[in-house]
Amino acid sequence: MTDNYLVHFFLGKVGAEALKLCRWPQWEQCFRLFDELVGPFGKSASITSEQAYQIPLRKLKSDPPGTYRVTLKKVPGLARLGWNLDNNRKWSQKLEELDPYPIELCNTTIVSSTKGGNPELCILLGDQNPLTAADGSYIGEKFIYNQSLTISVSERLHAARSAEYWDDLVARLSVLIGAVRVGRATRPWIRSADQRSAVSASPMLVSSCLGYGSFTKRYDSLDFDDRFQEWTYLK
């Protein structure tokens, strides 16, 4: 029998990079909220933050005016960090570094465990759309959302806390992410043939940077994809 998960999916939009959920002032507040859930799993819980250096490339003669070429190189040292305050600060504050190149967040994944089957809890933070292009120009007005957060909790773990607890958590996270849409669904954990680890097999890997399917139907729409689950919109 396949266990089901309660999934909450948030789309948010803020007007400055410094206000994004992945930045430490906001993420520190998330850590305090999530530590109640993740902390009891102890050393089995881990964080993996996929980040990339934005390395500028030489322009081509055929490029139209305003073209800015960039390639991405993975930032090392951010895989399978233990769950604690210092490591949460480490991955979040890494985004503030500009030397040798600016850094962008692809996604940060937190799991209760990667051993012994599917984890009881998985959290994914995505930074879908930067507000500033690599050349420094502002592009934020083009997007109706620019960040996402997904929390998948096994039915067992969900039942261990009251409905009021989950409602309060969703309300607090909605404020922190600047929610423009929040949805809830129940669904099984789904693995595809090329997804080998519990982290990569998460049912809510939604960051467009990874090339996985998103819970959104279109990047210019707030409608969620309902092919594999039925969504209840909370906002």
Image (cartoon, rainbow, N blue to C red):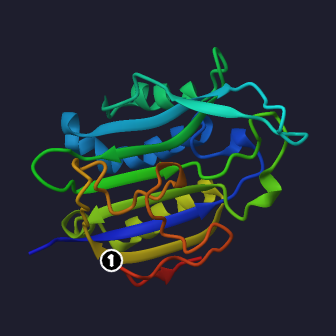
Q: Which residue is mark 1?
A: 186
Quarter of the image for residue 105 reads top right
Quarter of the image for residue 56 reads top right
Name the quarter where the C terminus is drawn: bottom right
- Place of residue 195 in the rendered image (x, y in percent of width and height, measured from the top left): 26, 53
Choose between 84 and 191: the one closer to the eye. 191
In the image, what residue occupies the spot 51% across and 34% down? 51
Vertical side of 167 occupied by 42: above or below: above
- Report whether 100 appears left or right of 84: right
In the image, what residue occupies the spot 63% across and 60% down? 12
Is residue 19 shown to the viewer in this render? yes
- Report whether 80 appears left or right of 117: right
- Number of labelled discs? 1
Give the class, few, some or many, for how many residues have Cα within 10 Å of label 1's Cα (few <14, many ≥20): some
- Place of residue 92 in the rendered image (x, y in percent of width and height, measured from the top left): 53, 32
- Report whether 132 appears left or right of 32: right
Vertical side of 162 occupied by 119: above or below: above
Q: What's the residue type where badge 1 is placed? A: Thr
